[in-house]
Amino acid sequence: MVRTVRLSRAKGISLAPALMMSLCLSISLPIGACGNQTLGAGAQPPKADAGTTGPGATMPPGGMGKNGGMGMGTAAGSDAGVVTCTPGVANIALTSCGYPYTSSNPLTSVVFNENDVLRAIVPAGALPMASVRVFYNDEHALTLGVRSVAVKTASGTTTTDYPVSSLTSDPGSVTNAQTGANELAGNQSGFDQSQRPMWPVLFVTDVTSDPTSRSGDWQMGGKPYSPSAVFGSWKAAVRTVDTTVSPATVSIAPDADPAKNNWSLGTGSDPVATGLANEGFGAEVRWDVLLTPGHSYRFQAMVHDGDQNKVGGDSGEACLVYCTGGACAVGETAYLTSEGKATCVPTGGGGCPAGTTDYLVSEGAVCVPTPTGGTCPSGYQIDPTSEGSRCI
């Protein structure tokens, strides 16, 4: 047997201008892309009538209610997972994800048989920072990732180890968690038998122009984002790929459970809504996402439970839509300053207003402020150039 060890890279989420969407894992802004392999492809889902939006209160995803869970109640959105945002109105809408359904893309038919472990999804925050918080509870601890991949061939077995954040206390908490094997293709991927990431992930779709779009969903080849923070209890798993048979088979063996923590989630966790069912192992998974002003987004959260005893893997999904309100006015462009401030600035390239100057970003030219008395407005930094200073 051959054993190697691989280290993972730090990762993060930003949907703001000039910052790439990538497979990243940190609470800070990303410094570049670290993975561009898609998970699948296929037609968009069927069109559906738009659902009404709701206030964004704590509510489990559709299809929940296991063993006394809260159930869906009268949550917002249509059964097809479509929410239409009203221009100028900021809102958060809970919705079904709209799967499974049959199409030319086999991923749309994959069944999520453990939606009930996602006891609640709590949207929070506002521009420029949104937060998606998922509360997990089951008879086994949350799977945080694949710590080891064993590939069996005719000549033997090669094992590759990956770091997964350990549970140093119970309950525990971790930011920028290490989530094991994060490769998005091949034998060393961290996928279950249905090609879903084994670590907790968030998929993001910009629905500003098309409320029916699901282009960022897992089923459509979207990019997975790892959590900003995890609280409660968790464990890792081992992935075995047997290439001596055709087609190759994949099996997942989760580690032993830690001690039960129930709904005690540890330092820094958010309050648990009353009435959520408790089967012994609770966790909160949190994603903090920097949004672009004037854009609206669909978020799809996905987790795996801690026994993995069902065909195709044991996974749950939940979806919501952030309606961020009115877009930038005509003649303005969304811009993210060097200090992380999301704002609307005059569009450049055709003459900038007094007190501003042209600045070229990935979306085109914008007009940024010029320093006054050697200082910039709050949220900007001075950028000296050969043609004079500007605030970026």
Image: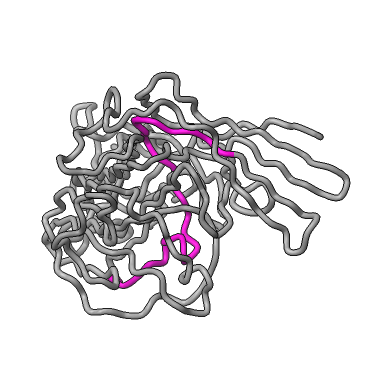
Write the residue at 63% across / 54% down: 185
Q: Hey, which quadrant is residue 368 in on the image? A: top left
Point out the stretch of residues depicted in magenta.
Answer: 209-237
| Whether residue 331 is situated above or below residue 36 in the rendered picture | below
55 lies left or right of 20: left
User: Across the whole image, how many numbered discs are drawn on residues?
Assistant: 0
| Quadrant (top left/top right/bottom left/bottom right) for the N terminus | top right
User: In the image as oriented, which residue stretches furthest toward the front?
Assistant: 67
Q: Residue 200's spot in the image, x, y percent?
A: 43, 44
- Residue 351 showing in the rendered view: no
Q: Do we see residue 140 in this rendering?
A: yes
Q: Is residue 240 left or right of residue 298?
A: right
**Residue visible at 25% across and 54% down in the picture:** 65
Q: Position of residue 174 (x, y in %)?
A: 39, 27
Compared with 54, 262 (above or below) is above
224 in the magenta segment: yes
Residue 107 in the image, given as x and y percentages of width and height: 50, 68
Residue at x-position 30% and y-position 58%: 319
Magenta segment includes 60: no
Which quarter of the rendered picture does the C terminus lie within?
top left
Q: In x, y percent, where is residue 222?
A: 46, 59
Q: Is residue 356 left or right of residue 182?
A: left
Q: Residue at x 22, y 51 (%)?
A: 344
- Please name the predominant secondary structure of the magenta segment in the image: loop
Which residue sits furthest top?
A: 169
